[in-house]
Amino acid sequence: MVVTGASSGIGRATAAAFARHGCSVVLAARRGAALEQAAHECEARGGRALAVPTDVSDATAVHDMARKAVDTFGRIDVWVNCAALSLFSPFEEAPLDDFRQVLDVNVMGYVHGMGAVLPVMREQGRGVVVNVSSVVGVVPQPYTHAYGMSKSAIRSLTTSVRQELWLDGVRGIDVCSVLPATIDTPLFAQAANYTGRQVVPMPPVYAPERVASAIVRLVRRPRREVVVGPMGRSVVLLHRIAPGITEKLMAFQVERAHLAHTRRAEPTPGNLHHPTEGTGAAHGGWTKPRHATTRTAVAVGLATAVAVSMRRRRSGI
């Protein structure tokens, strides 16, 4: 099992989940010390682990990591593309270098990963590729243009490659995407931020282990796409029924719950160009404010009910 972005967040939780099932895991990310710590955690859970410091925006480095995985374990059964960066900024104030870096890692990193592993899986005749996208790949939000673009691109890439494999008559290789809602990871604290306000997760916030479990299930029984988190599924459903209402609701929630009005933040490129120091963690340490979670759930529930009612009226149901 190869997992990119394995030094923290969803990637780290996924590597640990595979190890818990006795799998051999190759962990890839930019931070060597964090990867080693994650590898120790995987071995403590019963799996074998190999840490390979890798910048996924470097195609050569990704191919080298894939070769090392095959040389060490003989094959690659599963490849999880999970490395991600984020940028919060008004569109006209976003530094272009930062914008490009998000796309280089979040999109080209996945392109490099799939380019490295698909020839291996074709030769084996089997394998599963899991690309971690996001609910914002379906319903974009303000201030995270590069991140939203990248997550939409990941869904498109996944679907296109899956279609090509089908046309080629390849039936043993599955290419799937996972769309998490808001997850408790260090991403929010490490993101580039030019909004002037502190970035906090938009409730409800789910544990990264929830996504990891979904990925494990997906590997066992592949499906085209899975949304993780009840709120994420509600938002995706609402967007299908009433996209206009959903856009306004998303914008309102981001403005009210994703950016703290009372906590100012200095402009920072975050971890875009240089990885954060330390040994990393799966969790970001974010709490779940019950009042905010309830408010979000009620808002989405009411909006969905209104949208369904309007659709039924138009359809004469």
Image: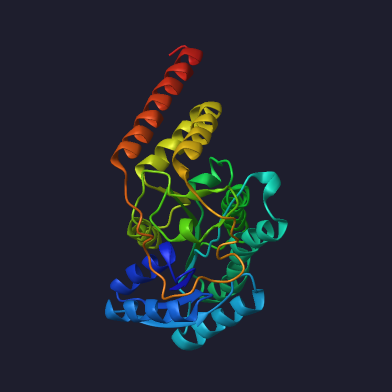
Residue at 27 percent of width and 76 percent of height: 45
Residue at 43 percent of width and 83 percent of height: 50
Question: In this rendering, would 116 be left or right of 177?
Answer: right
Count of numbered circles in the view: 0
Give how far across and how far down residue 235 sits, in percent: 44, 37
Give how far across and how far down residue 257 sits, in percent: 44, 40
Q: Quadrant of residue 162?
A: bottom right
Give how far across and how far down residue 296 sits, in percent: 38, 35
Q: Which quarter of the rendered picture does the N terminus lie within?
A: bottom left
Question: In this rendering, would 293 be left or right of 160?
Answer: left
Q: Is residue 72 above or below residue 250?
A: below
Q: Nearer the viewer, residue 38 or 127?
A: 38
Q: Nearer the viewer, residue 87 or 123?
A: 87
Question: In this rendering, would 96 be left or right of 200?
Answer: right
Residue at 53 percent of width and 72 percent of height: 121
Question: In this rendering, would 68 be left or right of 219?
Answer: right
Q: Which quarter of the rendered picture does the C terminus lie within?
A: top left
Q: Is residue 18 above or below residue 228?
A: below
Q: Is residue 34 above or below residue 269?
A: below
Give how far across and how far down residue 233 sits, in percent: 41, 40
**Outermost residue, bottom side:** 71
Q: Nearer the viewer, residue 23 or 140?
A: 140
Q: Is residue 317 above or below residue 146?
A: above
Look at the image and name its color scheme. rainbow
Q: Quadrant of residue 168?
A: bottom right
